[in-house]
Image: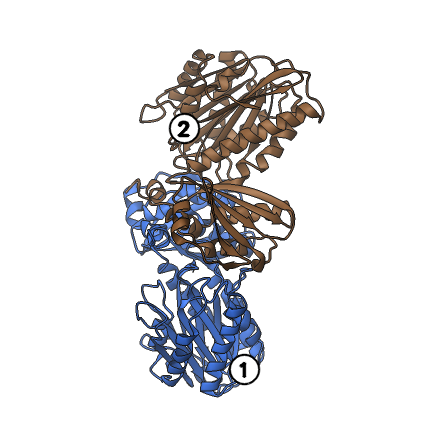
Chain colours: A blue, B brown
């Protein structure tokens, strides 16, 4: 697998994109992107498990069942969430507008919205914006698309890799946005992947859903789950590799590239969490089962007290052990070892559930790094899991609490 | 039932208390309290469900099984948590020291500790402090005891009520501390009640455990569950009412007083949550079942985004609806009504899962009050639940994240 630094989604065969300003954001920044694909692409997607589902999610859950998916349109500035029947009518108009402009079926269009909740879309701006976005589709629009889906994100999130399958070079590219797990007023988590891989919808779906469990589902900025969260992949087959229709070497290569892509995009979202000063990675090792390992990693990454301690660069192993203790996972507190890693440096702070004498100064140095890893050994079994998150800072409170005062 | 404003635990017949400085807190503030009772008191207690249990919890879980409980000793400044075998040895020495000083059995002594985690108690200070505390026991020591169990609490939490049972006036008094659900470095939730009611251990236990589910178990400051949390009640029978040994009118009167006592102490803890600028009460009405109502109320009270919105006095009903949506409870988002109450004022902000036009200025006025109530109507069934918490402020981050930097 190769990482293609300068490439983007429009470097995938048959993929065009655009990112334009349709006047939905008061700031005048780019707020609408369109992605289209040639051929007869198959797609897979996962949607928020929140019982409160935004209108685009409700429509997409139907559209994703259609055999082919040819276009994606995303607006930022308004989430079209908690908007009732009118919201559903509007999202269907958005899909139809793309379908008409690109001469595809409405069911072949995926629509997403992110931004303020509970406010109806201004369709007098949205429809012309979609038409403009469709007319601007190009082989160079990938970066503009990544910019147009941003809300409180401080940087655009994109990644492109290539790998070989069936004697062909396959390109896999993605764009994503954060930067809170949910912000009905501002943000949500979205990820869109495209590839020219030739693969059946069934195999694409299996690979994608398996990969999501260990990537997007293992990040947390604030423990709140969005009404709009969605991750999807579109594969158009234009690389002309022998079609992947069953497990095998090519399928494994694809899964490896997919795992890398989704994990890296997930980490970018966590790192850009609102107010975050650092990326925190929590690896839980030697748990009795995978579910337990994941519950432990997520309990630590979600703990406000642990997040505050990281903001303060405070080697507070007690808060970490406490979070493990109230997770649903089976564990013996008296066996737990905890160490911190920061860009190469390592320091052990707890052994067998108790503190060890450690150099507070060195621990602080490690915790002041931009990327900190917490290594937790439960010494119970052979299962491991990793979760990603960020610290809880004054700026998180400011962005979410003080911005209106 | 009467509320006795100026009274405290030592106004309960047969109860003596003291609160002294034993040098465990660097500040020199009071850090150890002893409570003793005459007669042959029965007791009931609930303990943290965290799998990481502090040494005093592990010992108390045994001692509470003993038929009688005659003394309580609590130190602040050190939680004796994650301290292994030495911690267990020390808590037993603490109990024995009280037993020797007051000539009671070791099993009749309950011990608690709150403060820093993972550090062994300095027994050379603790033992003389306990002896001093026992020697200072008096009928006026109630307020000193309430002060001595404080950590990051900004005020002492105490309440005394009286009610009639079996033709006698019964006094019920309690002291409590917060002010985070857990702070391995600083705080934990403790509540100690005493009464001169004459009641069997079995009935006391039933009444107390029922009451805890709707009070202490319904508050959240930061979603973290302590290694030391504990609430207990001691009843010495000195009011000489006809002993309560089965359900009946007197039992119901006691349960009513107990519910009031535990709920008010729980609200004081929530109101004094670290960094809190206001007390938030969330009442969820007309849920399908009690468990669902409680899950909904707790999801809203725990949501960081909602807590930040309250700090910013931002009438963000979308975040509340979103939190309801990701709770485990069964609900129909399209039925939910949401209103805010603030000291008499009321404003409805959402109806049938969608926003209503409301006066933003009036909403802000309400949200700037010191006590705000969120009224949520699920329109699904007849069950209700109330949870209490506080907002998420800069000071919470400062207290927990920046205090060491």
Q: Mark 1 lies on which chain?
A: A
Residue closer to the observer: B183 or A386: B183
Residue occupied by mark 1 = A68
Q: Is mark 2 on a helix, strand or loop?
A: loop
Residue A347 in picture, x, y percent from top left: 35, 47
**Quick check: B134 above or below A256?**
above
Discs 1 and 2 lie in a common subunit: no
Q: Which chain carries label 2?
A: B
Label of residue A217 in the image? none
Label of residue B150 in the image? 2
**Quick check: B286 above or below A117?**
above
Task: Look at 51% across and 12% down and name the residue there.
Answer: B102
Residue A291 in picture, x, y percent from top left: 55, 55
Q: What element carries label 1?
A: loop
Residue A180 in picture, x, y percent from top left: 41, 59
Is residue B295 shown to the viewer in this render? yes
Between the C-alphas of marks 1 and 2, the distance is: 64 Å
**Quick check: A43 above or below A78?**
below
Q: Give the quarter of the figure containing the N terminus of chain A.
A: bottom left
Query: Which image quadrant for residue A125?
Result: bottom left
Task: Look at 58% across and 78% down and name the residue there.
Answer: A246
């Amino acid at each position: 697998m190769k990482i293609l630094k300068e490439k983007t989604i429009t470097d995938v065969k048959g993929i065009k994109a655009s990112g334009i300003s349709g006047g939905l954001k008061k700031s005048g920044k780019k707020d609408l992107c369109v992605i289209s694909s040639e051929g007869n692409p198959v797609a897979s997607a996962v949607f928020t498990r929140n019982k409160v589902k935004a209108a685009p999610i409700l429509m997409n859950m139907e559209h994703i069942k259609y055999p082919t998916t040819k276009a994606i349109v995303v607006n930022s500035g308004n989430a079209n969430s908690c908007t009732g029947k009118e919201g559903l009518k509007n999202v269907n108009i958005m899909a139809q507008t793309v379908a008409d402009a690109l001469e595809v079926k409405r069911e072949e269009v995926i629509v997403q919205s992110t931004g303020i909740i509970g406010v109806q879309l201004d369709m007098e701006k949205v429809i012309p914006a979609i038409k403009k976005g469709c007319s601007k589709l190009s082989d160079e629009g990938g970066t503009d698309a990544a910019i147009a889906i941003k809300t409180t994100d401080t940087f655009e999130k994109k990644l492109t890799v290539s790998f070989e399958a069936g004697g062909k070079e396959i390109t896999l590219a993605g764009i994503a946005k954060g930067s809170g797990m949910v912000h009905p007023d501002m943000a949500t988590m979205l990820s869109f992947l495209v590839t020219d891989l030739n693969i059946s919808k069934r195999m694409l779906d299996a690979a994608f859903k398996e990969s999501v469990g260990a990537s997007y589902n293992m990040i947390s900025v604030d423990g709140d789950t969005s009404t709009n969260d969605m991750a999807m992949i579109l594969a158009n087959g234009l690389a002309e590799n022998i079609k992947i229709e069953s497990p095998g070497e090519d399928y494994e290569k694809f899964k490896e590239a997919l795992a890398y892509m989704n994990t890296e995009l997930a980490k970018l979202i966590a790192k850009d969490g609102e107010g975050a000063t650092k990326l925190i990675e929590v690896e839980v090792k030697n748990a009795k089962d995978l579910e337990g390992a994941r519950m432990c990693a997520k309990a630590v990454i979600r703990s406000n007290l642990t997040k505050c301690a990281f903001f303060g660069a405070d080697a507070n192993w007690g808060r970490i052990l406490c979070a493990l203790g109230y997770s649903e996972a089976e564990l013996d507190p008296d066996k737990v070892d905890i160490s911190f890693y920061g860009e190469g440096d390592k320091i052990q702070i707890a052994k067998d559930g108790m503190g060890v004498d450690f150099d507070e100064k060195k621990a602080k140095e490690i915790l002041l790094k931009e990327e900190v890893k917490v290594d937790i050994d439960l010494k119970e079994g052979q299962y491991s899991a990793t979760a990603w998150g960020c610290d809880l800072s004054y700026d998180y409170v400011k962005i979410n609490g003080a911005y209106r005062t």
